[in-house]
Image (tube, helix red, strand yellow):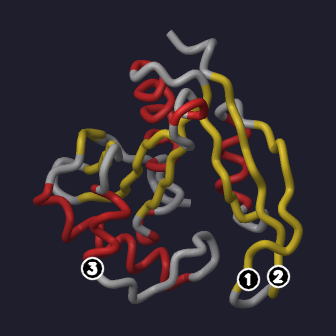
Amino acid sequence: MHPQLVSLVIRAATASDFGSIAKIFDAVTAEGTTYTLMPGMPIDEVRRYWFGDRIACFVASNHETVLGVYKLVANQAGRGAHVANASFMVDPASAGRGIGRAMGVHCLATAAAAGYEAIQFNFVVSTNAAAVALWKSLGFAIVGTLPGAFHHPTLGMVDAYVMFRRLDDMP
């Protein structure tokens, strides 16, 4: 188990953070166990993934190094825009230190403050036990199972979950 971070700052990402974000993206997608995104994506696509239109991007750092990144966006347009969607990545070298939880808590508060009424994760890989446990501990429920929707590099086809949480209990 890694030691908890003593000083973690979560802030809006800037263009100067992109190099660090891209390194985290490359490390996470290279593992191939949590995201459908493929390693080696063109850098412009990676940039659009985190900094595209209507995307709010945040980083978690220890004041010196970016250790994690998340984005917050409307899950759907128009009549579905009251439900947010978010994506999270933590540098694998910093996993288990509470960074994902801190970003999750920050995301919930940020989404509520932005007027979203709920958050939906469309694709949480079922074998990503740490993420499933984290989201459940933050009030998310599994509301759907997508059978065999993810091609895991060592386990073959595994399920993915749709997870959902209302935000009406947020301050």
User: For residue 137, what is the image quadrant?
Assistant: top right
Q: Position of residue 88 (x, y in %)?
A: 48, 54
Q: Amino acid at mark 3?
A: Ile
Q: On residue 78, which mark appears?
A: none
Q: Is residue 57 left or right of residue 70?
A: left
Kindly identify which residue carries mark 2. Answer: 157
Q: Earlier in the sequence, mark 2 or mark 1?
A: 1
Is the residue marked by circle 1 packed among few (<14), some (14-19), or many (20+) residues within 10 Å?
A: some
Which one is in front, 71 or 138? 71
Please give the name of the residue rendered at 39% of the width and 89% of the height, measured from the top-left corner. Answer: 40
Residue situated in front as seen by the camera: 89 or 86: 86
The location of residue 85, given as percent across then percent down, is 54, 43
Which residue, given by chain and number where applicable, does mark 3 sit on? 43
Between 78 and 148, the one nearer to me in the picture: 78
Tell me residue 114's x, y (percent).
40, 23
Residue receiving disc 1: 151
Tell how many labels. Answer: 3
Mark 2: secondary structure: strand
Residue at the image position 84 percent from the left and 49 percent from the top = 144
Label located before the other in sequence (2 or 3): 3
* 68 with respect to 64 (left or right): right
Q: What residue type is disc 1 on?
A: His
State whether residue 158 is above or below residue 144. Answer: below
Disc 2 and disc 1 in contact, CB within 8 angstroms: yes
The residue positioned 26% from the left and 58% from the top of the image is 66
Circle 1: element type? strand
